[in-house]
Image: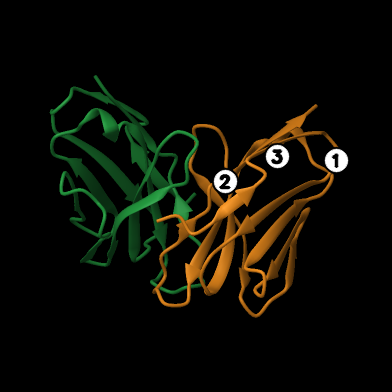
Chain colours: A green, B orange
Amino acid sequence: DAMVIQNPRYQVTQFGKPVTLSCSQTLNHNVMYWYQQKSSQAPKLLFHYYDKDFNNEADTPDNFQSRRPNTSFCFLDIRSPGLGDAAMYLCATSRVAQRDQPQHFGDGTRLSIL
Amino acid sequence: SQQGEEDPQALSIQEGENATMNCSYKTSINNLQWYRQNSGRGLVHLILIRSNEREKHSGRLRVTLDTSKKSSSLLITASRAADTASYFCATVQMDSSYKLIFGSGTRLLVRP
């Protein structure tokens, strides 16, 4: 089945130690999104790629970076994780960059900071 | 930034009852979407309603949209224990391209 896969499901890192979360998709969708979701809160968009074009949200901290080496893969890099970065990170895709396109989500990576 | 609020924040009902969740938003929208999130999982798209539509059905789901009141409701009829999840509305604003802005969510518990 076509899907969005996030690895790992759970990630533990140390305060200040760089960490990379990965997302892959078999849907061949043009747009890939990264969201941060803290406990009992709404998902918050960090940035997204439309093909190779990177779109950062204005309030996304510089500590968060992303790479999309090809259509199928997208990575979230947190350069120096702080305690406040502990959250669920969700990857999503949509077929094209149009308003009426639903987004397809992976099951997320839950990040813990020691 | 969060577009709006959902009401109630939490809802507990008996299996077989109907569940109604409400969503309010602040700015003009192109469409509004509802998503479900099971505990510890990703979001699943349920239904999309465009700004020129007033009501939409999908199986046991009924969504209404009132653009004059900037509000939407999601009705789940004949609820099942498997409907236990968090439900989020998300809007696509008129002045943005295609980004979703999520509401705060309603946590639904359906008791067997």
Residue B5 in the image: state x and y as whole percent.
Answer: 57, 52
> Which residue is depicted at the point 25% across and 60% down?
A58
Q: Nearer the viewer, residue A3 or B64?
A: B64
Return the residue at label 2. B105
Return the residue at label 3. B83
Q: CA distance from mark 2 to mark 1?
A: 20 Å
Residue A66 in the image: state x and y as whole percent.
Answer: 20, 51
> Which residue is depicted at the point 56% across and 71% down?
B31
The numbered mark 2 sits on a residue in which chain? B
Q: Is residue A56 above or below residue A112?
A: below
Q: Amino acid at mark 3?
A: Asp
How dense is the environment of label 1, judged by Cα within 10 Å: few (below 14), some, or many (20 and up)?
some
Q: CA distance from mark 1 to mark 3?
A: 11 Å
Foreground mark, 1 or 3, reads 1
Residue B55 in the image: state x and y as whole percent.
Answer: 74, 70
Foreground mark, 2 or 1, reads 2
The answer to whether mark 2 and mark 1 are in CB contact below 8 A is: no
N-terminal of the two: label 1 or label 3? 1
Q: CA distance from mark 3 to mark 2?
A: 14 Å
Return the residue at label 1. B17
The answer, for residue A101, to whether it is visible in the render is: no
